[in-house]
Image: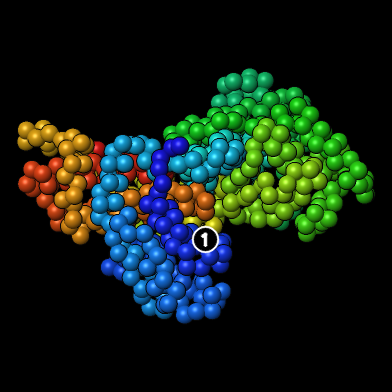
Amino acid sequence: MRGGTAMKKALGNLLDQALRQVAGEHARGLRHAGLEQARDARNGHYASNAAMQLAGKLKRRPADIAGDIVAALPAKQIIERAEIAGPGFINIWLDPGALQSELNRIGREGDAYGCSDFGGGRRILVEFVSANPTGPLHVGHGRHAALGDCLARLLEATGHEVWREYYVNDAGRQLSVLGLSVWLRMVEQATGADAFPEGAYRGEYIGNLAERMADELPGAAEAARKGMAWPEKQAGGNGEADRHIDALIEAARECLGDELFSAIARAAGDWVLEDIRDDLQQFGVRFDNWQSERELADGGKIDECLKRLEGVTYRRDGALWFPAERYGDEKDRVVVRADGRSTYFASDIAYHYAKRKRGADLLLDVLGADHHGYVNRVRAGLEALGEPPSCLEVRLVQFVALLRGGERVAMSTRGGEFETLRSLREEVGADAARFFYVSRAGEQHLDFDLDLAKRRSSDNPVYYVQYAHARIASLLGKLADRGLSFSMDESAAHAGLLTHRREIDLMLALARLPETIEQAAVQRAPQVVAHYLISLAQAFHGWYNHCKVLDAEPELRSARLGLAHAGGQVLRNGLGLLGVSAPRSM
């Protein structure tokens, strides 16, 4: 088994024993003995409301039940003392010796400290980002990348088998719009024509793709110099703009021929995807598989899925419909249009079904908030195919607003006015970007303060946490300069000297990493780790500023060096789960 029992879990086990002794069968099902971290260490390290939860069942005063529970707690283990507070809360202080022993465990387990086998090897396929290959990743995609990658890291740390996957939407209309946009820029560059339509993709990258296309597809360059025939009807409203774009796509196909137009669209999509891969790699995000929608269709997976649904689907108005309403969705859905083309919904069902057939126990999708209607319909499709609806879990991620100088940065993706993930990384650094992205729950809107992310002060949370690690590295680096040495064995022998209030606070903070990781994994909440690291840095800075280390008496110095070493290890482990570096100097 990786790791050992978390301090909270060990404490919960002792409380459970006492609860069973006091309440018998009534204690069954009481989650973790009602145990939570105390908000104020002066009122205990942990608190339990178990007595109040049992009062109704036992028909007794909570305070009396709490007294019996405290009396039933085993003596001389990890509990220093337990007291009854308020209407029946049980406040518990951990024994300093237990916290001191945890330092030894941190030293033994090193990079594995905090990990567990909680997941039992359950196979989880995490799909995230999956942005259409029609342009560079923007800052919103960056949040998806950071959250999805951190979730995968947390699940791996808790004993799950994790696969990371990016679904490449390379078979739909949007790729044709990309091809058209690049082609029109080629015509513009070759002839000087200035009639770029509303609804096409804009941005400097389209011009760059057009220049590259002219170099690598000579036939397209020659056709661009000849120009093209433009549909007479120009764009009006949004719907009209889409129809105009479709008409332009047809005109471009006629001008170039299907083969050349498709080659332009595919090449542009491939180059954009190449850029996306590089961008994510630079951001510390890797994928085990890049699943092409086009390959899914060409490989017959969509047709195979539709065949399995025969007898469930029905025909209406020339189209093939899936009875999604029967499975809990708000309405039935078209899977094959009247013209014979399958819909995105058909692709989505086939894709998720294929993921299940590859052996995933759970499909965890990290999607944009605009996909809220997506969940029920895909679950409906999986259920109709004989898969449990619960095998699909979707985490929705809200939008990101950038703040510069206290003002929001205007962004419009289609209009080409957006901040790319690459430009964000270059401005604030990958570490700050990742930490800020995951410091707030994904289902909440995020205001990303660029000025704060660049600030080198304690106001900046990622700087504050990384600085704690750098201070520890600096402290340990000074040993040789003073002719001193340090060993974990010697430090462990003197750990009993760590009794200062600041030392107790720091040891308690370090010991909470395992429960923090488990909580963050179960709740799919990387922000729990980010907030934990900030509180750990606070505990470290408070200790460092109040307790001498190198100038302390030899035995106390040895003990405190061990505490600092453990602090550095836990900071590295926690930052690693967020994909953030632990610098040795700042």
Whole-percent x and y of residue 553?
6, 46
Could you say which is closer to the camera, residue 38 or residue 416? 38
Residue at 50% over, 48% down: 521
> Residue 460 vs residue 276: left or right?
left
> Residue 337 vs residue 455: left or right?
right
Residue position marked by numbered label 1 in the rendering = 31
Residue at 85% over, 51% down: 323
Question: Within 10 angstroms of label 1, few (less than 14), some, or many (20 or more) residues?
Answer: few
- Can residue 478 be seen here? yes
Whole-percent x and y of residue 477?
16, 36
Whole-percent x and y of residue 295?
71, 28
Image quarter hosting the N terminus: top left
Could you say which is closer to the camera, residue 540 or residue 236? 540
> Residue 53 vs residue 429: left or right?
right
Could you say which is closer to the camera, residue 433 or residue 330? 330
Looking at the image, is 33 positioned above or below residue 54? above
- Can residue 581 be seen here? no
> Which quarter of the figure has residue 574?
top left
> Which quarter of the figure has residue 354?
top right
> Which quarter of the figure has residue 542?
bottom left
Could you say which is closer to the camera, residue 181 or residue 228? 181
Looking at the image, is 364 positioned above or below residue 61? above
| Callout 1: SS | helix
User: Which residue type does callout 1 highlight?
Assistant: Arg
Residue at 8% over, 48% down: 552
Whole-percent x and y of residue 504?
24, 56
Residue at 41% over, 57% down: 14
> How many badges with numbers are in the image?
1
Image quarter hosting the C terminus: top left
